[in-house]
Amino acid sequence: MRATLTALLASLLLGAPPAAQAQFTYTTNAGVIILAGYSGSGGAVIISNFVTSIGYQAFEGCIGPASVTIPNSVVNIGVSAFLDCTGLTNVTMAGSVAGISQNAFGGCANLTALYFMGNAPSFGDSFEQVPATVYYLPGTTGWTLFSVLTGLPAVLWSTPPAIAFTSPTSGSNYSTISNTISLGGTASDIMGVTNVTWTNSRTGGAGTASGTNSWSASNISLDPGDNPIAVTAYDSAGDARAATLTVTLITGSLQLTILPPAAAHAGAQWQLDGGPTLLNSGATMSNLLVGSHTVSFIPVSGWTTPADQIVSVSNYSTASVTGSYLSLHVYPAAASAVPTNGFVVAVNVTDGGYGYTNTPNVRIIGGGGSGAQAEAAVSNGMVIAVQVLDAGHGYTNAPMVIIDPPFANPILGIAPASALVFSNLTVGGVYQLQQSVAWYWSNQPVHFTATNSVFTDIVPGVINSGAYRLALEPVPAQAFAAPEVVNGFVVGATVTDGGSGYFTNPTVSIVGGGGDNAGGVSQISGGVVTAITITNAGIGYTGAPMVEIGQPPAAAMSPAVQLVMRVDFANLNPYENYQIQFTPDLGATWGNWNGGLFTPTDVTNSQYLVVTNAAGFFRLQYAP
């Protein structure tokens, strides 16, 4: 099915920016997206990376485009695609392009450079009436410069000779001399080639006094090497001529910084020209072709992604670019102090934070000194500077700089918990905390050697004293078995874990499964359950019942249980004072909770409060 897509529809369906797509018309055919037409105003045209083919006469006769960048998604350039684009001066073509169709660039009279970013695609008479010199850029073993008039690039040597060239025999009549010159080196040594200039003079031979017959050189494989390069060529009359080749190399780099640093810490990255490499903040891309490049940014949860940027890379320079993410959540700013001779002389903002609607307090803490004071400056929700008001004295190292988070009401969360208090432990004894799970005891992560006679642990929820126990090692292990059910009868049971510590045969109960009356007995050997014998198959079992084996005896103790509340706080200002308050009824007076005054060192804080009231309410009060 074929369908012409408007620019807006293409942007919505294909994920391309509407502004970039407004110049183009597309068609689709069996999933192939073809750029079918162009109606833009010109300048630098960058084709979107969802296009797979440039269609027949897509740009024909366009005067506007001065440069065109063809992305890595394009594999074919159609017949007469850029025919008679007289304003076109340079084209950058990705290595994915496999073929350039007939007369694709015919009549582009001002085309001065064609940059192939991979191996040269196949082409025949694609460049008729194009008097330009075209640069064939990165190859696998070298770089080649060739004239479009010859239509044939030079062979790239895997090991180029130091200098090699071919020339006609003196006196032969050649209308065009085709010399091949190569210098040693690799493609990684060079970024691009421009301004290739030949200067020449006759050195003797037949016809030295007759005219100035012109000659040309093509098929030149280049590498930086020595510059300029001296070679010998012959003119159309066969006369020897001395020539000097001067090569100006194109180099460029791009460095990008992601702001704010918190976005980079959250995983924000960038990529260049849709390439597969993801780069971190501060990374530099070197060896870039001079001209326009597209920087795009990777989405990160909790942050808005910056729009793509078109960046211009210049010869012999590094372009510096920033990409600014915006946080979807408020978070505090960060800064560092600069002490000199015991005084805090400056504070540098390392992260401006986000979400500030007022000016936060700044505290300078530690560092061996005292008295330093500073204030923050806020703009667009971020801390942009911190000014020192008092340098203080006596600082032997850099103190901490604490900037209050953006103003937000503290968040309080409450959940019930239980404090387990075990007494009369044997000092030096090794204990394992266990929880009652269904009909057996399960080991918990708490495992320790007692250093005193009392041990306390806190577990979530409201529990009774029989829900946990502390077992003295060696701790016996529970035995388990799986039933065998046939036609509603329990006909057997297989021991899956024999457990340990059994001194007598434990009881066996068969529970659930939809039936009843099944039963069995156990056998032990060496403290391990070795077998289960079914003594009554029961009846009516529609599913697998549970085979419950009695617990092995253990030296264990039960705890005294005290109800506590886990209170969690968020959105706190570090190093401020807060007071926990309580009231038994919302209509009653609030009172300070005994021991509830605290100074958090972070934006969050958690505490356990011992509860004696049957009901009540908590709140947090700022205590300056």
Image: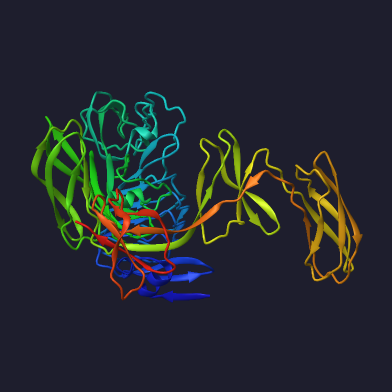
Q: Could you tell me which residue is drawn at 27 percent across and 53 percent down? A: 323
Q: From this viewpoint, which residue is outermost toward the front?
A: 424
Q: Is residue 109 visible?
A: no
Instruction: Name which quarter of the figure residue 484 lies in.
Output: bottom right
Q: Could you tell me which residue is drawn at 35 percent across and 45 percent down? A: 280
Of 59 and 35, which appears nearest the observer? 35
Quadrant where the C terminus sits is bottom left
Residue 336: x, y in percent?
21, 42
**Is 477 left or right of 620, judged from the image as shown?**
right
- Number of numbered discs overlaid on the protein picture: 0
Instruction: Name which quarter of the figure residue 301 lies in.
Output: bottom left
Q: Is residue 49 visible?
A: yes
Residue 26: x, y in percent?
41, 70
**Is 184 left or right of 63, judged from the image as shown?**
right
Q: Is residue 205 above or below residue 450?
A: above
Q: From this viewpoint, which residue is outermost toward the left?
A: 389
Q: Is residue 139 above or below residue 92?
A: above
Residue 418: x, y in percent?
50, 57
Q: Could you tell me which residue is drawn at 36 percent across and 57 percent down? A: 105
Of 162 and 41, which appears nearest the observer? 41
Of 211 and 383, which appears nearest the observer? 383
Instruction: Name which quarter of the figure residue 569 lies in.
Output: bottom left
